[in-house]
Image: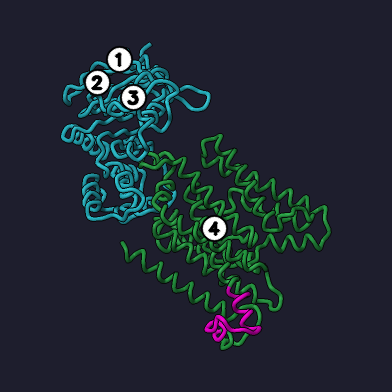
C-alpha cells in the first residue's frame, strides 16, 4: 500500500526536479550552461547572467511549478466534487471572470487595481455569483455546472463585446494574455502567489479522504460520515481561489487541469491520497516543460504557453483515448 | 426503547410535501420491511430516517436523541445507510472502495491498519467478493456493485442498517444470500434493520414487521400475515392479487394476476 503510492510520487518528484533543472539550463535566451551553474552556485554574485538566472528564469520556473501543480490539483478537486471526469478548474466560470477583468484593464484601461487586481476581482465576482446561485439549490452538481457554464459564456461574450469595440493592438495584447503566459514581470508578485497557492495546495492534501467520499456522490458521502454540503463548499471555495490566483498571474492556461488528473488517475488509481500529490507533481513537470518549449520553439518569438499545453495535451489525450480501456471508465 | 423512532414526520423537497405525518419505530433485533407502490414516499422516508433531509415537521430520534443534533460522523458510526444503486464514476479498486466505509470510525487522517484489513477480509468473505476484490468498481456488474456497496456499509459494523431496495439488481441466489446475511445480523448481533423492498414475497419471508406505505402515509403496519392481505394490497397497489399461505414457514405468499387470467 505505502510502496504503491510512494514509488510513483517519488518518480514524479524526481522528474520535476530534472525538468526544473533543464528549464534553468535552457531558458529563453542563450546563456552558456557553465554560467548558469556558476550563477546558481553563487547566489550573491553579480552580472547579466546572474540576474537572468536569479531574477528571470528562476521565478518563472517557480511560477510554472506552482501554477502547474495548482491547476492539476484543482482539476482533481473539481472532477471529484462534481463527479465528472470532464470537469476542470475553469468549469465553474472562474476563468471567465478573470478574463473579463483583464480585458477591461488591457483594452479599456479601466481599473486602478492593475491588471492582476482586475483579473482577481473578476474571478472573485464569478466565484461569488456561482456560489450564490448554487447555494439556493443545495449545491447540486447539475446546478453548479450549469451556473458555471452560463457564466463562462456570459463573461466570454462580454469579453468579445469589449474586443469588438476596441483597437486591434489592445485586443492583440488581451488575446495573448488570455492564452496564458508565465512571463510575469513582477517577481514579488510571483513569490506572493507561489506562497499563497502552495500553502493552499499542501492544506488540500490533508483532505484527500473527503474527496474520495464526495466522489461517490453527496448522498453516499453523507451516509459514510461526511457533511457533504459543507465539504463541497469548502473544496469549491478553496480550489476556486487557488485557480483565481493562477489566472490572475498567468492567464488562462488550458488543458493542464483536465489532462493531468486523467493521466495520474491512470498511473496511480483514483484514490485521492495517492492521486492528488501525484497530479500536482505531474502538473508542475508538464507546465514547466511546455513553458520551456514555448520559449525555445520559435526563438526569439515566445509562444503563449497555453497554446503549447493545449496542443501537447490534446494530442496526448487523443492518443490515449484511442487506446481501448486505457481510462478505466469503460 | 426503539433505537430509531420516526415521530409524526412530514417531509419533502422544495415546495412539495411527499410524506405526511408518518410514525414508526425500529427496535433492536428487528427486521422491518417497508413496501409500497412507486412514488408512495418510501425513499423520502428513507432519506428522513437517515437524516439526509430534515423533516418539515415531526422528529426522528436515534436512541432517544433528535438526529438533527447528532453530528454527521457520529450518526454514520452507528447507522449504515445504503441508497438505491447508482453508478460509481471513478474506477476505485473494490477493496479501496469498501475501506471507505471506515471513514466514520477512523476520520480523514488515517491509513488502513491491521484491524481494518481483518474487517475487510470478513466482509469480502461474507459477501462472496473474493473473485472481484482486485477489480475496479466501474467495470463490475450491477449485482456485484450492489454487494460491494453492502460490504462498504457492513464494514463499519453498524447497530442500525437502512437500505433502499438493496436486492433489486441481484439474481435469486444473491437476493437470498443478502437477506440471509441481514437476517443473521439482526438475529445474532441484534442489529436493527429497515429495508425498502419491492418484492412482497421476499418481505414476507424475511421481515418481522412490514410497513405498507400509500400516498406518503403508512397504511398498515404489523407482522407479514397481518399486513399482506388481499384487500390491503389491492387497495394500496390498485391491482389484483391472490394471497395464499406459502409452503415455507407458513408465511403469506402473494400471487400476481395477469390480465388474461382476470375474470370480470
Q: Which chain is cyan?
A: B
Secondary element at tag 1: helix
Query: What's the distance in space between the residues labelled 4 and 3, CA to CA?
Result: 44 Å
Q: Nearer the viewer, mark 2 or mark 4?
A: 4
Q: Earlier in the sequence, mark 1 or mark 3?
A: 3
Q: Nearer the viewer, mark 1 or mark 2?
A: 2
Q: Which chain is green?
A: A
- Badge 2: chain ID: B
In the shown orientation, is residue B16 left or right of residue B141? right
Point out which mark residue B138 bears. Answer: none
Query: What's the distance in space between the residues labelled 1 and 3, CA to CA?
Result: 15 Å
- Asked if the stretch drawn in magenta spans residue A38, the answer is yes
Dot 3 surroundings within 10 Å: few (below 14), some, or many (20 or more)?
A: many
What residue do we see at 63% from left, 64% from top?
A: A306
- Badge 1: chain ID: B
What residue do we see at 28% from left, 37% from top?
A: B78
Which residue lies under the disc numbered 1? B230
Q: Nearer the viewer, mark 1 or mark 3?
A: 3
Point out which mark residue B35 bears. Answer: 3
Which residue lies under the disc numbered 2? B224
In the shown orientation, is residue B224 left or right of residue A133? left
Which quadrant does the N terminus of chain A fall into? bottom left
Secondary element at tag 2: helix
Dot 2 surroundings within 10 Å: few (below 14), some, or many (20 or more)?
A: many
Query: What's the distance in space between the residues labelled 2 and 3, CA to CA?
Result: 11 Å
Q: Are marks 1 and 2 on the same chain?
A: yes
Which residue lies under the disc numbered 4? A258
Q: Are marks 2 and 3 in contact (CB under 8 Å)?
A: no
Judging depth in this view, the residue of A201 and B121 nearest the camera is: A201
Reply above or below: B19 against A222: above
Query: What's the distance in space between the residues labelled 1 and 4, CA to CA?
Result: 57 Å
Amino acid at each position: 500500500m505505502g510502496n504503491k503510492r510512494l514509488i510513483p510520487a517519488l518518480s514524479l518528484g524526481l522528474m520535476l526536479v530534472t525538468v526544473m533543472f533543464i528549464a534553468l539550463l535552457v531558458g529563453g535566451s542563450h546563456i552558456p550552461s557553465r554560467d548558469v551553474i556558476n550563477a546558481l552556485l553563487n547566489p550573491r554574485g553579480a552580472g547579466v547572467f546572474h540576474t537572468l538566472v536569479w531574477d528571470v528564469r528562476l521565478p518563472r520556473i517557480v511560477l510554472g511549478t506552482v501554477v502547474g501543480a495548482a491547476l492539476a490539483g484543482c482539476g482533481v478537486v473539481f472532477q471529484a466534487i462534481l463527479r465528472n471526469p470532464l470537469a476542470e478548474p475553469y468549469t465553474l466560470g472562474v476563468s471567465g471572470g478573470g478574463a473579463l477583468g483583464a480585458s477591461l484593464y488591457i483594452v479599456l484601461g479601466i481599473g486602478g487595481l492593475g491588471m492582476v487586481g482586475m483579473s482577481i476581482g473578476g474571478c472573485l465576482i464569478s466565484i461569488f455569483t456561482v456560489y450564490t446561485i448554487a447555494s439556493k439549490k443545495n449545491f447540486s452538481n447539475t446546478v453548479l455546472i450549469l451556473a458555471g457554464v452560463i457564466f463562462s459564456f456570459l463573461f466570454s461574450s462580454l469579453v468579445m463585446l469589449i474586443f469588438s469595440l476596441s483597437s486591434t493592438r489592445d485586443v492583440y495584447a488581451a488575446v495573448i494574455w488570455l492564452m496564458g503566459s508565465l512571463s510575469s514581470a513582477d517577481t514579488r508578485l510571483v513569490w506572493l502567489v507561489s506562497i499563497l497557492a502552495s500553502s493552499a495546495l499542501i492544506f488540500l492534501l490533508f483532505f484527500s479522504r473527503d474527496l474520495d467520499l464526495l466522489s461517490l456522490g453527496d448522498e453516499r458521502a453523507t451516509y459514510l460520515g461526511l457533511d457533504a454540503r459543507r465539504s463541497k463548499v469548502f473544496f469549491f471555495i478553496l480550489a476556486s481561489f487557488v485557480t483565481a490566483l493562477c489566472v490572475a498571474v498567468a492567464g488562462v492556461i488550458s488543458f493542464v487541469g483536465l489532462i493531468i488528473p486523467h493521466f495520474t488517475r491512470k498511473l496511480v488509481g483514483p484514490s485521492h491520497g495517492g492521486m492528488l500529490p501525484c497530479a500536482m507533481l505531474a502538473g508542475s513537470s508538464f507546465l514547466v516543460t511546455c513553458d520551456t518549449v514555448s520559449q525555445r520553439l520559435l526563438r526569439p518569438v515566445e509562444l503563449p504557453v497555453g497554446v503549447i499545453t493545449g496542443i501537447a495535451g490534446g494530442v496526448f489525450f487523443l492518443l490515449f483515448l484511442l487506446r481501448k480501456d486505457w481510462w478505466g471508465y469503460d | 426503547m426503539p433505537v430509531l423512532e420516526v415521530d409524526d414526520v412530514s417531509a419533502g423537497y422544495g415546495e412539495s410535501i411527499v410524506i405526511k405525518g408518518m410514525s414508526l419505530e425500529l427496535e433492536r433485533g428487528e427486521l422491518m420491511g417497508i413496501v409500497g407502490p412507486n412514488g408512495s414516499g418510501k425513499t423520502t422516508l428513507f432519506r428522513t430516517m437517515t437524516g439526509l433531509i430534515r423533516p418539515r415537521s415531526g422528529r426522528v430520534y436515534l436512541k432517544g436523541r433528535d438526529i438533527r443534533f447528532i453530528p454527521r460522523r457520529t450518526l454514520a458510526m452507528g447507522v449504515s445507510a445504503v441508497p438505491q444503486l447508482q453508478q460509481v464514476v471513478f474506477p476505485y479498486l473494490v477493496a479501496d472502495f469498501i475501506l471507505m466505509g471506515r471513514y466514520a470510525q477512523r476520520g480523514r487522517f488515517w491509513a488502513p491498519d491491521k484491524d481494518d484489513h481483518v474487517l475487510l477480509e470478513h466482509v469480502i468473505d461474507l459477501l462472496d467478493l473474493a473473485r472481484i476484490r482486485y477489480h475496479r468498481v466501474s467495470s463490475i456488474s450491477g449485482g456485484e456493485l450492489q454487494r460491494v456497496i453492502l460490504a462498504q456499509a457492513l464494514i463499519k459494523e453498524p447497530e442500525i442498517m437502512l437500505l433502499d431496495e438493496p436486492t433489486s439488481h441481484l439474481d435469486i441466489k444473491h437476493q437470498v444470500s443478502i437477506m440471509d446475511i441481514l437476517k443473521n445480523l439482526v438475529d445474532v448481533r441484534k442489529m436493527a434493520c429497515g429495508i425498502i423492498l419491492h418484492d412482497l414475497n421476499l418481505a414476507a419471508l424475511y421481515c418481522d414487521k412490514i410497513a405498507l406505505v400509500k400516498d406518503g402515509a403508512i397504511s398498515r403496519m404489523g407482522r407479514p400475515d397481518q399486513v399482506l392481505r388481499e384487500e390491503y394490497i389491492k387497495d394500496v397497489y390498485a391491482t389484483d392479487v391472490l394471497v395464499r399461505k406459502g409452503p415455507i414457514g407458513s408465511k403469506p405468499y402473494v400471487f400476481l394476476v395477469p390480465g388474461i387470467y382476470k375474470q370480470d
